[in-house]
Image (spheres, rainbow, N blue to C red):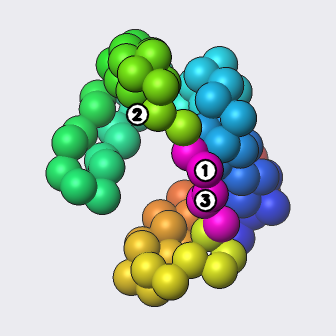
């Protein structure tokens, strides 16, 4: 698994923790699809921006998001499967 992909995911989580919309958006493809654990789906970077602006604008904040110690084992497996499914950097040459 590519170290770069892990650092991108860590940047995504860190951006949410710091409420930095641009940091999160830098990690996403223009045509990304983000699915929240509770069901809503956001398609495309522009819609993710709108979602974050609304959510953060309502005073919401991510207080804690530690994937390494997360008790949601299935979610961790999904993240690992997602990262494993992406090509390694050296595979794209």
According to the picture, the residue beneath numbered tag 1 turns out to be: 63
* Residue mark closest to the camera, 1 vs 2: 1
First of labels 1, 2 by sequence position:
2
76 in relation to 25, above or below: below
The local crowd at label 3, few if under 14, some if 14 to 19, many if 20 or more residues have their Cα within 10 Å, is few
Which residue lies under the disc numbered 2?
32
SS type, badge 3: loop
| Residue 35 in the image, given as x and y percentages of width and height | 30, 47
Q: Residue at x 56, y 64 (%)?
A: 83
Q: What stretch is highlighted in magenta?
A: 62-66
Main SS, magenta region, reads loop
Q: How far apart are marks 1 and 2 (CA)?
A: 25 Å
Inspect this view and state whether residue 29 appears.
no
User: Residue at horizontal 47%, vertical 25%?
Assistant: 59
Q: Can residue 21 be seen in this view?
A: yes
Residue occupied by mark 3:
65
């Amino acid at each position: 698994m590519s170290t770069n992909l892990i650092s991108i995911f860590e940047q995504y989580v860190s951006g949410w923790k710091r409420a930095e919309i641009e940091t999160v958006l830098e990690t996403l493809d223009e045509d990304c699809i983000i699915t929240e654990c509770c069901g809503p789906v956001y398609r495309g970077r522009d819609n993710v921006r709108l979602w974050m602006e609304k959510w953060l604008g309502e005073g919401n904040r991510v207080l804690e998001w530690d994937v390494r110690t997360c008790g949601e084992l299935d979610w961790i497996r999904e993240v690992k499967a997602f990262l494993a499914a992406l090509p390694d950097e050296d595979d794209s040459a």
